Amino acid sequence: MKKFLLLSIFLAGAAISSQAQDSVQIRRFYDEALVKGQCYDNLRYLCKKIGQRLSGSAGAAKSVEWSKKLMEGYGFDRVYLQEVMVPHWVRGAKEQAYIMDGKNKIAVPVAALGMSVGTPASGITANIVEVRSLKELDALGESVIKGKIVFFNGPFDQRFIETGAGYGAAGIQRFAGPAAAAKYGAVGAIVRSITPALDDYPHTGGTVYAESGKKIPAAAISTLAANKLSNMLKLRKLPLIKFYLKQSCQTLPDVKSYNVIGEIKGSENPNKFITVGGHLDSWDLAEGAHDDGTGVMQSVEVLRIIKATGYKPKNSIRAVFFMNEENGHKGGIKYTEQAAADKEEHIAAIETDEGGFTPRGFSFEDASPKFLKEINKSWKGLLEPYEADRLTAGGSGTDIGPLKEAIPSIKLIGFRPDSQRYFDIHHTPNDVFENVNKRELELGAAAITALVYLIDQHGLNF
């Protein structure tokens, strides 16, 4: 009994000592990020000197070259490019769109959806059919849809506190709506921008066609213009309202591009990996600041902070700049294929692709109630002083998602910043460097570094 009591006291003391050491180390990470951080200046260069980075573009190629040099300059143990073939979609000339009410013509802001086909050179003009869901589209069928432009006007559900859930719910009409409309003979599709904001900025984003199906021109329309069009359809007789759309986008042959990877070798387990990453590519309407310049700059900052503070990780830590998340996911797929081919052992992967706003915590994919209880018991107190302690069940990210099938033991994790402003600027001309807050960006980088450290020290066997 006495021996058991002494053992219990010893173990409790060891746990307290470990927590104290963790607390001190995490404080060092935050001090480095907030006082000597470099992610904000790196983001400025990426946005202002390089700009948009759509897959296959000159901007994307330039960003790969610069990112590799950036990592090499930090002196990581290994920096390399991972070749991947990516789609090459180009927007072409600025889109034109009008609501046509008899003799009146009202210009409205639109942006072609990524991977959409263009219209004829003269544009298309057709009557409008408004729907608010794919289910409503299916109910109308070919007899109503054929020869029309389908107007998908399902709104962003404001009841979601986590706006990513609202985006996912409304996003189906953009991802799948145009292909579904084409199946019923529509000649085009316009989609209400997926945002809780009411403004005149169209939000682009990818759409997916059936491989063997008809492809019709598809564009996003701003939320204010969507409301205007919907109101006009209600107030006037339907045949009087037509819509004109002209866009010259096209898909060119695939081109060679690269994931950019930096690595700090583990001191004890160099063949075990913890990955942190975001996507280097962006849409072409702006600079891709929050989506996802902040994510890649936070990822490389994690490795910089680890190196600058002198921490020697047990396991190898990788920063991955994935290419082609926005319109193909080829970079994430390639990373998984190579990891599987090399028979790598991956402990965890963290994706940061929800903007560079104030960190709130992390979500763990396929997390059991027991796992959540134990990880919160062990780590919540360490992250709570920095207000990044929400450790919940949830999704991780598009680029790291394929890893789960190839490496079932891996734990996939999503970085969760405050979400309330992200979809105001997501995929719009407003996604620029000026809309990123330096301190928020740095706090996020520090929070991710802290989690990487805790995983490296203690593992995830809760």
Image (cartoon, rainbow, N blue to C red):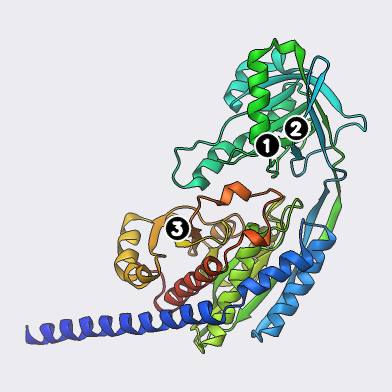
- Residue in front for this viewpoint, 448 or 320: 448
At numbered mark 2, what does the secondary structure look like: helix, strand or loop? loop
Circle nearer the N terminus (3, 1) = 1
Please say if 345 is above or below 281: below
The circle on residue 462 is: none
Cα separation between marks 3 and 2: 39 Å
Q: Split into 4 quadrants, where in the image is the N terminus?
A: bottom left
Identified at 53% across, 38% down, the residue is: 169
Residue 363 — which label? Answer: 3
Q: Position of residue 259 (x, y in %)?
A: 71, 67
| Front in this rendered view, residue 349 or 234 | 234
Q: Position of residue 108 (x, y in %)?
A: 75, 32
Of the residues shown, which amino acid type is indicated by label 1?
A: Ser
Left or right: 306 as drawn, with respect to 256: left
Identified at 39% across, 60% down, the residue is 390
Q: Is residue 257 visible?
A: no
Q: Nearer the viewer, mark 3 or mark 2?
A: 2
Q: Mark 3 or mark 2: which comes first in sequence? A: 2
Q: How would you rate the neighbour count of disc 3 (Cα within 10 Å): few for under 14, some for 14-19, many for 20 or more?
A: many
Q: Disc 3 to disc 1, how far (Cα)?
A: 31 Å
x 16%, y 84%: residue? 9
Left or right for 3, reference 191? left
Disc 3 residue type? Ser
Q: Is residue 314 above or below residue 127?
A: below
Instruction: Check whether the beta carbons of the residues at disc 1 and disc 2 lie within 8 A of each other.
Output: yes
Residue 409, horizontal then vertical, whole percent: 48, 64
Find numbered disc 1 in the image and state the secondary structure of the residue it sits on.
loop
